[in-house]
Image (spheres, rainbow, N blue to C red):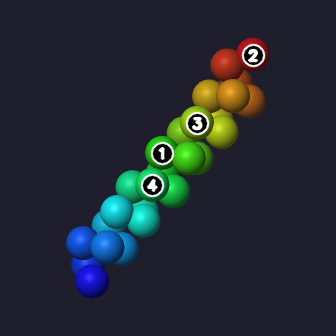
């Protein structure tokens, strides 16, 4: 269970990074 939540956390963090890069990358 902890590993699954960790994967979700990592995935959401990666999506957040992608979003930030899109906003500040321009």
Please identify the quarter of the rendering in which residue 1 is found.
bottom left
* Kind of element beneath mark 3: helix
21 versus 3 height, above or below: above
In primary-sequence order, the first of circles 3 and 2 is 3
Q: CA distance from mark 3 to mark 1?
A: 6 Å
Alpha-carbon span between mark 1 and mark 2: 18 Å
Q: Which mark is residue 26?
A: 2
Secondary structure at numbered mark 4: helix
Calculate the distance from the C-alpha at mark 3 to the C-alpha at mark 2.
13 Å
Please state the horizontal and vertical placement of residue 16, each as a whole percent of the image: 58, 47
Q: Which mark is residue 11?
A: 4
Residue at mark 4 to residue at mark 3: CA–CA distance: 11 Å
Q: Which residue is mark 3?
A: 18
Tell whether label 2 touches label 1 (CB within 8 Å): no
Q: Looking at the rendering, which quadrant does residue 22 occupy?
A: top right
Q: Between disc 2 and disc 4, whose residue precedes?
A: 4
- Asked if the residue at tag 1 contacts the one at tag 3, i.e. Cβ–Cβ closer than 8 Å, the answer is yes
Q: Are marks 1 and 4 in contact (CB under 8 Å)?
A: yes
Q: Earlier in the sequence, mark 1 or mark 2?
A: 1
Does 14 sit left or right of 6 as displayed? Answer: right
Q: What residue does disc 1 label? A: 14
Name which residue lies at 75% across and 16% down.
26
Helix, strand or loop at mark 2: loop
User: How busy is the neighbourhood of tag 4: few (under 14 within 10 Å), some, or many (20 plus)?
Assistant: few
Mark 1 element type:
helix
Q: How would you rate the neighbour count of disc 2 (Cα within 10 Å): few for under 14, some for 14-19, many for 20 or more? A: few
CA gap, disc 2 and disc 4: 23 Å
Q: Residue at x 67, y 19 (%)?
A: 25
Residue plotted at (51% across, 56% down): 12
Of labels 4 and 3, earlier in sequence is 4
Q: What x and y, as percent, mark residue 19? A: 65, 39
Quadrant position of residue 6: bottom left
């Amino acid at each position: 269970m902890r590993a699954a939540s960790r994967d979700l956390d990592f995935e959401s963090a990666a999506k957040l990074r992608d979003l930030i890069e899109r906003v500040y990358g321009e």
